[in-house]
Amino acid sequence: MTILTAMAAAIIVAAPVQAAASAPDLGGSWEGRIAVGGQSIRIVFRVDAGGNAVVDSPDQGARNIAVDRPIVEGGVVRFVVPVIRGQFEGTLSEDGRTLTGVLSQGGVSLPLVLARTEATVAIASRPQAPVGPFPYRSEAVAFDNAEAPGVRLAGTLTLPEGAGPFPAAILITGTGPQDRDETIEGHKSFAIWADALTRRGVAVLRFDDRGVASSTGNFAAATQADFGSDVKAAFDWLSARPDIDRSRIGLIGHSEGATFAPLAMQDGAQAAWLVMLAGPAVSGGEIIQEQQRRIAVAAGLPAEEVERTNALQRRAVVAVADNAQDPAAVRRTVEALLLAEGRPPAEAARAAAVMASDWYRGMIVHDPAESIRSIRVPLLAVYGGKDVQVPADQNGPAITRLKPDAEVVVLPGLNHLFQPAGTGLMAEYGQIETTLDPSVIRTVVDWVAARSGL
């Protein structure tokens, strides 16, 4: 997350509401605009013929965020977005073409009028999505995190044909509430990783983040250490299965998931190998600082604007780091900083609240150096040459310094999701049909197969 997204983004949120009655007559796209910080931002709810819904914020590069089935009570329509704890509630017009109401998130409510813009919902093409029949077995599984009462993690285990015991991989999602497929913009990269690896003879476990989809727990209250403990719980559960060779279980973490994996290993997960996909190797504060600058440059902002916003980002990061143990102090300091920069009060308060959260404070000050140095097993670190979120030339050399025997691979032209990219900006993710470039699949699967004795 950058300070820009903290100021103007994620505006879709409040407490989940239990479904009452589904509303099949809401099929289509509902589009409106909210005013935030002097910007007009599009919000689009899309409902298919079966009543399934997603929400997009195209101007912020966010698409396909899961929404509960729409609810209608007494002429009021409610769209609930449980993953980010938000909702829209509005009154349906007599002609069924307009919803007039309020969009809520984190205590902030904004007026929003949604207009029905089309009769059907177009589904983006994702040609790599695995389609059965499959030459392997698939099980729905669930396991508890003994260190976190109330956290039960649900997932999918794919197993090669035969009796085993099989080598295995655990897939670990990155920043933000993610389901077991790490679904982003309709791309299901973890489903593709599981398919490719299992076809090669490696069992694969992937699971929903705590508090997301079928997993229980409180995602919003979790820290880096909590997510690391979830990975450890996954490792312990998988290694106890008789059809899995516990001496050949490895971890594959994407983005911040590559931070959680070494933490789990420090906590006792005896992984045989580790793959870091676009994994941070410097502190979160350094990542955020460079991320913001790269995004601004890739977006074509003038040099003076890049420097101005990056200087503001730097001051905000320092404010968080200096007060990391005191969330109230972070909130006060960051809010005062943004107000001094002329930001509207509501915007400054919202950004300060995000940056005062346990996860954000932990991310800013966390330095993965110690956990990476402690790795005594083979490590493959793969980066995209056009990644503006975890830049290859910032993090690849750091990996080499911390673990000289690590294999570091930079794949030219690929973004943070390992798609072939133009600018590398997040806004491109949904526009690119390819989910994973063949070069990254080949690189990782061949490496894992070799370390698994296949």
Image (spheres, rainbow, N blue to C red):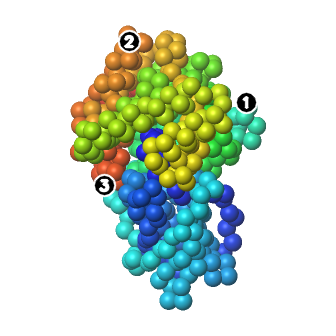
Q: Position of residue 294 (x, y in %)?
A: 31, 36
With 27 as the anchor, is 15 left or right in this view? right
Mark 3 crowd level (few <14, some 14–19, many ≥20, 10 Å Cα): few
Q: Position of residue 82 (x, y in %)?
A: 61, 56
Residue receiving disc 2: 401
Find the distance from the CA under tag 2 to the CA under tag 3: 36 Å
Q: Nearer the viewer, mark 2 or mark 1?
A: 2
Q: Nearer the viewer, residue 64 or 180?
A: 64
**Front residue of 317 and 185:** 317
**Callout 1 crowding tier (Cα within 10 Å): few <14, some 14–19, many ≥20:** few
The answer to whether any part of residue 447 appears in the image is: no
**Distance CA(mark 2)–CA(mark 1):** 33 Å
For mark 3, give the secondary structure.
helix
Q: Is residue 396 left or right of residue 370?
A: left
Q: Is residue 394 above or below residue 35?
A: above
* Residue type for callout 1: Glu
Residue at mark 3 to residue at mark 1: CA–CA distance: 40 Å
Decide which of tag 2 and tag 1 comes sooner along the chain.
Answer: 1
Residue indicated by mark 3:
431
For image coordinates 32% across by 45% down, the residue present is 425
Q: Disc 2 on helix, strand or loop?
A: helix
Where is residue 454 drawn, in percent x and y? 40, 24
Q: Is residue 340 visible?
A: yes
Q: Tell me the residue at 57%/73% (across/down).
A: 101
User: In which quarter of the view is residue 398 placed?
Assistant: top left
- What kind of residue is marked 3? Gln
Q: Which residue is mark 1?
A: 147
Q: Amino acid at mark 2?
A: Arg
Q: Kindly identify the residue that appears in the image at 76 percent across and 37 percent down.
A: 149
